[in-house]
């Protein structure tokens, strides 16, 4: 019914929808070399924390397949290096590290097996992670759809649909589940500068889902809130600290402050794999600074004078006190998040 | 020293820097037909409330020159129609109506004179208005520069420099006067979607003035404020109601709320010609809604799926309670603005 997927495994290669070309063109990359997966993550051919996690796992599986040793010890040590290399692709989304960690732990647990068997397990695991992401997203969507009511005008930022995940979507998954459950509402889509994930991707996905939306410049959200035309904000996350502080696409913190000022509930949607319980709060989240050219140019064309200095922070951090709730596959976590999240903290090993 | 001007009168024509082509190209349009002035205002070849006022006056003068009657009564009636036509160019900036009103009152006051004399007076008046705008801006700049201190990081939105005025600038004029007075500071430039007046024009002007700046996406202002990297916000206005409520470029209200949340002073700079004392508050300011294509396309290239619905409000209204002060040619007005502005309300005629 949704005739596209962000990423999938196809026999011995990764197929990946090149999101840099959307909405103009629907082009699938076919990748057999893990270096190309790194490049795809770095250049945002694939983006969105859960999708990055799946891509990293599949990239690791590709890397494993390419290793030409039959010695398990050597295999594991070279596999570890590949994972470390993939981990450098982007710094903020924790799903990247979570996925690679899981792949490495699996490999190590198979240390006694022949290399071919370890490889097969890794390939299977990457595919399992994609399936799990789908299941997790659908659970989140079911948990979150109670927030959506008929007639609401919902605002979202960046892209959190099937494109940003293995399948279905996080915040957009919540809207999709509500829509499929018969609720009727409309969506304000922040265009999300500089890379316009809202304008290019969220509109494209909402269009395919048949959910009515209106695209707006990021600067217009405030006045719509003031006019009483925004009932709820829901969006995704790239990393959430143990206290609920949330890193997400640049502009998210702005929306959070504006929602707070106007008394509008602000919800985050993210799987538990996006939580980083190792850090107490958002101050510890590394925020990626990307090339200034993403701000000064659009598709190669300058929008500013040559050499204009620009700052391109890819993410910002929203403090927990601005967040009404975090939708996860285990239900909607409410403040104080340190308490509500406690049962889901990984136990000390 | 600033080798450009937004608009000037040249013997029998209007020369106008085509701001749609900046920063790529510095092209001056030469206009003899007032319809082209209307088109230039409508398509933003010239924009910024004070510049629109001057352009409207010069357009009216061009229209007057073209009238082929020697009958003062017929001349005045046809001139009135021309002014009414120019008044349709854009709805929000009150300087447009203020300038046309002034031209019409002048024409009517000359009703007993030969048509040639009235025409000459109108042409002279349009040029006077440009000179007055320069003088007014320099007075504003002097009044406002006390707000700027060494080491400050100042945030501005849209463009308020010499390009947005007859000369010198409003909010950017304040920064220019401070800089020329030896103060050293830096500027965060909101790119100002959808039409990128910050990215295209403010950067260009600050570059020419030698004032250091950094361009940011509009959504990044909040996180810079949170990090303590914004000391002051200063920007312009398109229409200010009697109570100080201020219409300005879309995204301004967003910046105002964010500044308020972070305890950062938020200043507006505008000449008295931008005040509309006929309306008690901002609810009465008509906000122009422009073509959705300005959001969905950039220089003819789509950034959203074909047919994507978009809302393109050109302005928003910032309530007076978020404004620390309004810099005018009569000094800095402080809240409550109804009181501080009282001496400058036009007397009932």
Image (cartoon, coloured by chain):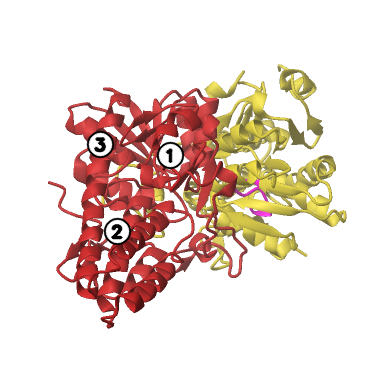
Chain colours: A yellow, B red
Nearer to us in this view, A260 or A275: A260
Q: Is residue A176 left or right of residue B75?
A: right
Q: Residues within 10 Å of mark 2 (few under 14, many from 20)?
A: some
Q: Position of residue B265 (x, y in %)?
A: 44, 26
- What's the magenta region? A156-163
Nearer to us in this view, A343 or A253: A253
Q: Residue at x 28, y 52 (%)?
A: B163
Q: Residue at x 73, y 45 (%)?
A: A133
Mark 2 or 3, nearer chain start: 2
Q: Is residue A33 above or below residue A97?
A: below
- What secondary structure is marked by label 2? loop
| Residue designated by label 3 | B139
Q: Is residue B135 visible?
A: yes
* Discs 2/3, front: 3
- What secondary structure is marked by label 1? loop
Q: Please tell me whether residue B279 belongs to the stretch shown in magenta.
A: no
How far is the residue under mark 1 from the one under mark 2?
37 Å
Mark 1 or 3, nearer chain start: 3
| Residue designated by label 1 | B345
């Amino acid at each position: 019914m949704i005739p596209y997927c962000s990423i999938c495994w196809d026999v011995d290669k990764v197929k990946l929808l090149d999101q840099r070309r959307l909405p103009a063109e629907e082009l699938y990359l076919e990748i057999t070399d893990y270096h190309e997966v790194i490049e795809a993550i770095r250049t945002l051919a694939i983006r969105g924390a859960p999708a990055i996690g799946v891509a990293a796992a599949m990239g690791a599986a590709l890397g494993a397949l390419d290793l030409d040793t039959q010695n398990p010890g050597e295999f594991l040590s070279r596999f570890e290096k590949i994972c470390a290399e993939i981990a450098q692709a982007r710094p903020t989304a924790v799903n990247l590290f979570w996925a690679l960690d899981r792949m490495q732990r699996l490999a190590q647990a198979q240390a006694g097996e022949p290399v071919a068997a370890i490889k097969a397990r890794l390939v299977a695991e990457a595919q399992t992670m994609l399936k799990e992401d789908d299941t997790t997203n659908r659970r989140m969507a079911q948990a979150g759809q109670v927030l959506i009511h008929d007639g609401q005008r919902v605002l979202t930022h960046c892209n959190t649909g099937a494109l940003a995940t293995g399948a279905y979507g996080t915040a957009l998954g919540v809207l999709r589940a509500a829509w499929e459950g018969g609720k009727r509402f409309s969506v304000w889509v922040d265009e999300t500068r500089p890379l316009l994930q809202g304008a290019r991707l969220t509109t494209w996905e909402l269009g395919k889902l048949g959910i009515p939306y209106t695209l707006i410049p990021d600067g217009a959200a405030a006045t719509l809130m003031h006019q009483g035309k925004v009932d709820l904000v829901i969006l995704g996350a790239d990393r959430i600290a143990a206290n609920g502080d949330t890193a997400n696409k640049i502009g998210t913190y702005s929306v959070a402050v504006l929602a707070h000022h106007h008394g509008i509930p602000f919800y985050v949607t993210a799987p538990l794999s996006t939580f980083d319980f190792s850090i107490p709060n958002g101050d510890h989240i590394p925020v990626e600074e990307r090339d200034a050219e993403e701000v000064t140019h659009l598709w190669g064309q300058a929008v500013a004078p040559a050499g204009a200095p620009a700052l391109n922070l890819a993410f910002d951090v929203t403090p927990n006190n601005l967040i009404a709730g975090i939708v996860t596959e285990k239900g909607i976590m409410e403040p104080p998040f340190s308490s509500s999240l406690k049962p889901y903290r990984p136990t000390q090993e």
